[in-house]
Amino acid sequence: MKQHSDFDEMAVGESNNRLQSNNSWYWLSRLKVGQKIGIGYGVLLSISILGTTIGFFIADRYQNQAYKREQAAVEKLYQVSQLKTSVFRVRTTQHQLLLYMDRPKLWQENYTELVEYVAQARQVWSDFGANYSIENPTIKYNSVSEQQAVYRLLKNYKGFNTYLKRTEAFFRVNNPSQLSADEIETAQNQLFNFMHGSSVFLMDEFLDDIKSLMEVIAEEYKQSKQELLRAEDLRLKIILGSLLLSIAIATLLAMYTSRAIARPIQTLTHVAQQVTEESNFDLQAPNTTNDEVGILAVSLNRLIQEVQQLIKIQKDANEQLEVYSQVLEKKVRERTRELNEKNQTLELALEELRRTQARLIQSEQNTES
């Protein structure tokens, strides 16, 4: 039993020496097989989740950028559209007021709308100037055409607020409900001249430039929409690519982990097969882990050693029995030879006795006769 204990201690010591030579993996070799499998599954799942999550973040980043560009284009388009609508409403309401000079009630209703439209136009123009300032270099434009169109509006139509003030004042003092018939006719002529003067052509050019800016921004919106579609397609490809990459890495790691677990078992099985098939009890199973496989390797090596010792004992016994058999056979042969010699001596003695007896009988017969 002491010999077996020494063998186990020697095997475990050699195994620990080999394991400690690679400290980076020493902790892994001390784990049980179930723990290794659990850690392997955890690592595989973590890699899959992490890779997919990173793919989602990268893809969402591109998609969000495209979405923000699209939203910015929509907001710009909405603001410019509001500006165009407010200017158009002011111009249209002016014409309606000119036609309703002889109908004070309708004129008053449209005048109220004009005041509202003028206030809206002033607010929209103020917001437009705040969002697009020539003096602010931090404003980013999506294209040179947009920048040029915005600069043209802000530079060429600085007097838009003045035009709105003149419109309010001009129609306020020419309220037909406060004028006589002659004054109304005079007011109509003044309004007609005001609405068909140089300011009118300036407003027409203003509307044309706003329309041009709308076309530029609409084209940008179209491009941003296409970029968003490409970003969504790229997002899908990135997610699929990251998922496939994660699966590939997880598969390689799974193969490595399963091989790390199965290789010692396969080596142990191969040694056991060689021992049983070839009856070669000089073989020893290598022990590279401290888990159940390592314990099994130590037990197998001890079993092989014990069988080897038993075979040696049996061989020694057989050799001793053979020696005993040879000695016994020699003794039997010697005893048989001795018995044969004694039998021959006895037969000679009997023969001599018979001859002596015959001579005595012959001698007695001769005496009687």
Image (cartoon, grey):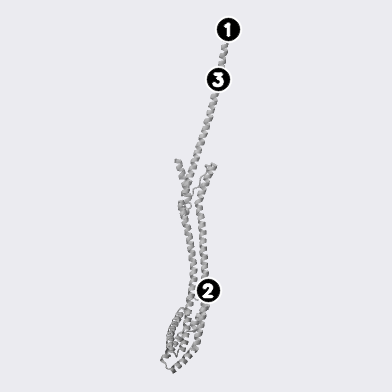
What residue occupies the far bottom of the structure in this picture? Answer: 182
> Between 290 and 223, which is closer to the camera in this rendering?
223
Nearer the observer, disc 3 or disc 1?
Answer: 1
Q: Name the residue under label 1.
A: 365
Q: Position of residue 331 (x, y in %)?
A: 53, 26
Q: Position of residue 122 (x, y in %)?
A: 44, 83
Residue beneath the point at 53% across and 73% down: 223
Q: Name the residue under label 2.
A: 223
> Between 215 and 17, which is closer to the camera in this rendering?
215
At label 1, the amino acid type is Gln
What residue occupies the far top of the structure in this picture? Answer: 369
Mark 1 residue element? helix
Label 2: how many Cα within 10 Å (few below 14, some 14–19, many 20+): some
Q: Label 1 near label 2: C-beta < 8 Å? A: no
Rendered view: 341 above or below 244? above
Mark 3 residue element? helix
Mark 2 residue element? helix
First reached walking from the N terminus: tag 2 or tag 3 = 2
Nearer the observer, disc 2 or disc 3?
Answer: 2
* Real-space Cα separation, disc 2 to disc 3, in angstroms: 132 Å
Q: Mark 3 points at which residue?
A: 343
Q: In this view, does 124 lie to the left or right of 336?
A: left
